[in-house]
Image (cartoon, rainbow, N blue to C red):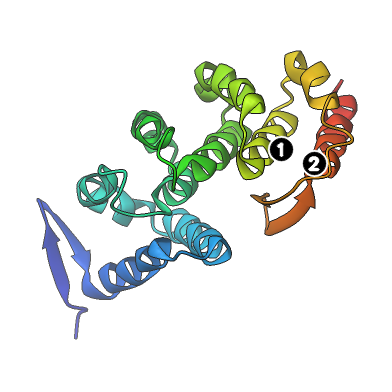
């Protein structure tokens, strides 16, 4: 017996995949930064393994995430979808702009832009000034995330500004590539400097 299917616009998606996708996305609503991170990575893995499903349900995902207050982890999830489905990257970057100044989503925005830039650097070039501007952020989490992103993307023009935080003892929970970690701003700065030096 064939699997049940559900209509999504003109596309047909197996019910099992549709249900799994909904279950994953529900985790993006968590107030816990670690849970949102794990969910975003799971969504990226789902998109990597099922790109056709993601393309079919993209209109629904777009409208679900178009409201910046609809989902705390939307920017993180969108970033991981973009990494997995290249033809959606430009559309997703345009949508991510909406999260840039949203208090609940701006840290995820920085991480998402960086994650996309790691696989297609030229697409995020216009976002680099925004990343640099966040070195003036008051919130330690935003500052730490911006420093991490600038190191990952090898933004050499920000090196002197990054060095200025080497002795900063404030702590922040930041998204890295494989986990959420708590570090001092100084430690994040030194690690970013190492990345810049290694890539020189």
Q: Quadrant of residue 197?
A: top right
Determine the residue positioned at 34% across, 55% down. 71
**Mark 2: which secondary structure?**
helix
Residue under pointer 2: 188
Secondary structure at badge 1 equals helix
Specify which label sits upstream in the sequence, 2 or 1: 1
In the picture, which quadrant includes the N terminus? bottom left
The quadrant the C terminus occupies is top right
Viewer-closest of 119 and 50: 119
Image-based side of 197 in relation to 182, left or right = right
Pick the front one: 185 or 180: 185
Residue at far bottom of view: 1
Residue at point 43%, 66% (across, down): 30
Local crowd at mark 1 within 10 Å, few (<14), some, or many (≥20)?
many
Q: Is the residue under label 1 in contact with that under label 2 (CB below 8 Å)? A: yes
Residue 24 bears which disc, if any? none
User: Badge 2, how many Cα within 10 Å: few under 14, some, many 20+?
Assistant: many
Which of the two residues, 163 or 1, is positioned nearer the viewer here? 163
> From what the image shows, is residue 110 above or below residue 128?
below
Name the quadrant containing residue 110: top right
- Residue drawn at x 89%, y 29% as measured from the top left: 198
Q: Indicate whether 124 appears above or below 18.
A: above
Residue nearest the observer in this picture, 185 or 114: 185
Give the distance between the C-alpha atoms of the residues marked 2 and 1, in whole angstroms. 6 Å
Q: Position of residue 13 (x, y in %)?
A: 21, 63
Q: Position of residue 134 (x, y in %)?
A: 60, 27
**Residue 173 horizontal/vertical position (percent):** 67, 54
Left or right: where 195 falls relative to 43: right
Tell me what residue is drawn at x 39 percent, y 28 percent. Answer: 90
Which residue matches tag 1? 148
Q: Position of residue 136 (x, y in %)?
A: 64, 25
Left or right, residue 112 beside residue 160: left
């Amino acid at each position: 017996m064939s699997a049940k299917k559900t209509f999504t616009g003109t596309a047909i998606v197996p019910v099992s995949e549709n249900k799994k996708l909904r279950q994953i996305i529900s985790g993006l609503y968590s107030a816990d930064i670690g849970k949102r991170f794990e969910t975003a990575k799971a969504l990226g893995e789902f998109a990597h393994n099922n790109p056709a499903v993601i393309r079919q349900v993209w209109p629904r995902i777009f409208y679900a995430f178009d409201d910046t207050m609809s989902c705390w982890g939307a920017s993180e999830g969108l970033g991981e979808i973009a990494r997995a489905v290249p033809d959606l990257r430009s559309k997703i970057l345009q949508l991510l702009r909406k999260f840039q100044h949203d208090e609940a989503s701006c840290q995820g925005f920085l991480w998402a832009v960086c994650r996309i830039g790691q696989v297609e650097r030229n697409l995020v070039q216009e976002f680099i000034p925004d990343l640099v501007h966040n070195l003036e952020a008051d919130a330690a989490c935003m500052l730490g995330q911006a420093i991490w992103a600038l190191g990952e993307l090898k933004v050499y023009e920000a090196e002197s500004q990054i060095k200025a935080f080497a002795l900063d003892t404030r702590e922040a929970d930041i998204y890295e590539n494989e986990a959420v970690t708590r570090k001092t701003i100084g430690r994040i700065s030194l690690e970013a400097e190492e990345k810049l030096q290694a890539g020189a």
